[in-house]
Image (cartoon, coloured by chain):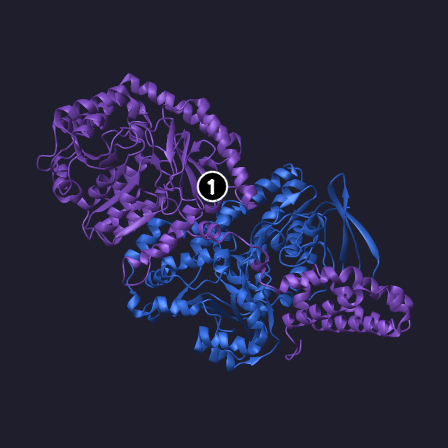
Amino acid sequence: MEALNQRDDNELIHSLLDTAERAEKYLSNRSFSEVRTVPESREALRGFALELGATAEETSEMLRNWTTHVPWDELLALRHGAEVAERDEAALHGLWDFLQRELPAVHAALEEMSEPPHLRRSVDPDEEYALDKNLNDFYLPGGRDLLARTEEFHGWVEARRRTETWQYSRLLDAAPGSVASIRNDTGRATRGINFNSQDYFSLNAHPAIREAAAQALREFGPHSAGSPIVLGNTRYSEALESELGELLHMEHVMLFPTGWAAGFGSIIGLVRQEDHVVIDKLAHACLQQGARAATRNVVRFEHLRLESVRQHLQAIRARDSRNGILVVTDGLFSVDADWPDLVTLQALCREYDATLLVDVAHDLGALGPGGSGVLGMQGLLGQVDLVMGSFSKTFASNGGFLATRSEAVKQYVKLFAGTHLFSNALSPTQAAVVLRATRIVRSPEGELLRRRLFRAIHALRDELIGRGRTCMGEPSPIVPLLMGNEKLARITNRLLFDRGVLAFLVEFPVTPVGSARFRLQVQAAHTPEEARTAARIIDEAINDARAYMSSAFGTGLA
Amino acid sequence: MFDIIVIGARCAGATTAMLLARKGLKVLVVDRSTFPSDVISTHFLWPHGASYLNRWGLLDRVLEVTPSHTVVNLVNEGIPLEGTVPEELLRQYFQLFHGDDSGIVQRYCSVRRRVLDKLLVDAAVEAGAEVREGFAVDELLEEDGRVVGIRGRTRDGTRVEERARVILGADGRNSFVARTLRLPKFDERLKCTFAYWTYVSGIPLDTVHIHRRGRLGLGLVPTNFGQHMVLVFGPSEWGTTFRRDVPGNFQKALDFISPELGELVRGGQREERFYGTLDQAAFLRPLFGPGWVLAGDAACFRDQCTATGMSHAFRDAELVSTALEEGLSGRKPLEEALKSSYESRRRGQVASAYYDFVCTLAEMRPPRHDDLSLYVALRSNPQETNRFIATMCDVAPVADFFQASNIFLLTDVAKESSSQHPIFERFEATSRTYLQNPFA
């Protein structure tokens, strides 16, 4: 047991450093022959060795075993060496040798241990701050001044803008095709292969779509001039509802001004405070927020894990046989590119008297036979309780819908979903565009576009995977390239901006902390060659970012 | 000729040697120390750490001489949280890393290294590994760019040379193997904590207490010999002023963080000197190359602030021994085995998120309003409190907790409000005072 009153190691290290400094200074302009022949010098040398040896002996075993790069055995031997060196020439030479040759390295090692390490290196404080934080650090600010308390967040945004690691709020300078000309939010322009837009069939540039828009504009003007519940709908809206109903094999469809409004509204329209929502933890934000707005009884289940749904349903039904349960999931998940087994999920819901709501925003039109999406792929058309979606991915417009087999449900949600009732309707142009797009999706041309889209998807995924990268999920218009670490992802994104690839970096709150990824959204207009070129550029940018940050992460993403 | 020579016979080395010897490989393990022997360490085992010992049949021996407990107490700015790593998450962890969740226990213990390391060395010997204590390695033998053996000195100074198919560097933060091979350091994070600690008897607490206030933290942990480890930590840039008066500043810090615990420590009897370090910059090194592999702190070092070093060393031991056995038995090419069974689990997105988590914590910035609000929300939610504790010690992925739908929902259903906690009264002003170095 070591004595209570021994000095602590840092004090001892300082004492060693002090002796080392004096010894180095003393020896710097002396030769061994002087030390050997001048008694004063010999005594001084022995004195330094004695001091060093005695102090080393006092250090703790803990410290010595931790700092294995310091030659403690030699330091400990100095004391004995110094005693012998009074008479022994070889011992004296041994001391001289150690102090001349080894001491500077010991000195450096001890110094490094005793000074705060970050003072050793200067870093760009902006870049450090920009890379270090995540949005969740700013979620719950304090203070009663609602306006002033956004300043800290803004300071971080500014740091990210200054270091060009802020991926948000980019601007288009021209229509976003397979290539786009854009500016970042500091106003710097670039042009690149565009995986940053959501237009899976590239319908935004389709002549028939543009013509439909122009015709509706001429006919009705730009404005719908009212809520859909009053007089905001046109005959385009009516035709669209019935066309979508045919695509989905569901008789009753209602329209919302945005996809977000459809998701949020469908849940708050139906679910009340005592009801329950059981929701996939990665389901879209409009569904999560709708659930939270509707009830406090929200349970999140592990992504796609139906066994966990069953457990939750069982548990809820064991204590509540009176209220409703809404089970909520995406079809194609928008940042993971996978989908649930809906056949089993719908059956589970029936077993426990729960209702299933599926968000088909990303898959309807782009996947499945005749554009029927994940529902069509699983043979479930017309068999799922509630289907909602958005037009903004494949159907070239804002807007969303809810589809049901029940007229009662449709009428009820119309009046109880505030996002429908208290919002201006889709514009006539939007309704006409989506109507035309739905017809294209269901036509032979739609089949052709899907084939072209998937050729580009496969080219992109194959090239990335062939280069050792991790593409998550299943082949679909969303190709999530896993990065994991946000710092690495932000630097990669900065490099990509100037190298001709436009990719969207998703991080918290879209993904969990530590699960950043590039969400590459493919279009039918992308050629396989463009996709391969982009994959090559992305791969090189990741390598360069890792070298820039001297990072070992990202080798075994799982 | 050995199958493997392990350099370093402590948490990563002795255990890997033991596991490989149990698989029938011919193992030599050397260490410059003779055991029992102490080394700087948090010497804390989280439940996954204790579970590894249990899986290997060693936990009972540790618990015979070491107190253990089943919950942790965290207090941030006076907001208390109590909980434990849930069994379900522990199972998921062991399934994910090792495909086998046998032997898990929900125990925490703090075991002095002069107790634990001796026990591990003995277990390696029992398993049939050849252990040479007091052995100093001077050189690595290299042939055709491949490490093939070591040259060193035994306790009595005899020079010896030994050869093996693979050399494992389990020789700590300042690894001889890494320095000799001039391996680079990756992802260096220089901001870290200073930590000072000592051992005190007569403290009537039987679970681990971790408190944070401002930029300072304390740990009070029951350990061997009827003593508690008492630990104070803060930002490394305050370490240089702290050490001007260690006993005085130590008590000052305790009293600042928690007057009650400060009083408890004052009433106890200090049994050893103070120990301290601020040499804790985090880094990663490459995990393997021709003829060599690294494990434990040699491969990845992080700040003490989450006390996960030993639990991670044990994890490395299980992973790397599985990979080495696959490779050395010829079932897989060695490099492929190390890549798929070792590197992929140590350098993936889960590992990188945790690395960032610890390095950010180690900067010891004053708690953010966000953090504290979250702790208040957690107070009425034992399930998520437990997930948070599991996240802190790297049993549950950071991503599972810090996920938007989870965090939003957590705060939605919170039953307690900030009004019950004084820190929120003058939060900004208080935060500003926290930036002042109290030891200056």
Q: Camera-side residue: A207 or B99?
A: A207
Residue linked to disc 1: A483
Query: Is residue A157 at all visible to an observer of this figure?
Result: yes
Indicate the position of residue A379 as horizontal and vertical percent values. 29, 28
- Counting from the top left corner in percent of width and height, residue A325 is at 23, 46
Q: What residue is at 48 percent from the left and 48 percent from the top?
A: B350
Classify A153 as above or below B439. Answer: above
Of all chains, the one bearing label 1 is A
In the image as oriented, which residue stretches furthest toward the top? Answer: A444
Provide residue A85's location: percent of width, then percent of height.
Answer: 87, 71
Please give left or right for residue A81 compared with residue A395 in the image: right
Residue B403 placement (x, y as % from top left): 38, 49
Query: Which residue is outermost to the bottom?
Result: B267
Which quarter of the figure is the N terminus of chain A placed in?
bottom right
Q: Residues within 10 Å of mark 1 (few under 14, many from 20)?
A: many
Would you say A516 lies left or right of B128 here?
Answer: left
Mark 1 lies on a secondary structure that is strand
Which chain has been coloured purple in this picture? A
B319 to A539, vertically: above or below: below
Asked whether residue B32 appears in the rendered view, the answer is: no
Amino acid carrying mark 1 in the image? Met
* Horizontal side of residue B374 vs A66, given as left or right: left
Asked where in the image residue A184 lies, by quadrant, the reply is top left
Residue occupying the point 66% across, 49% down: B20
Query: Which quarter of the figure has residue A209?
Result: top left
Colour in which the image shows chain B: blue
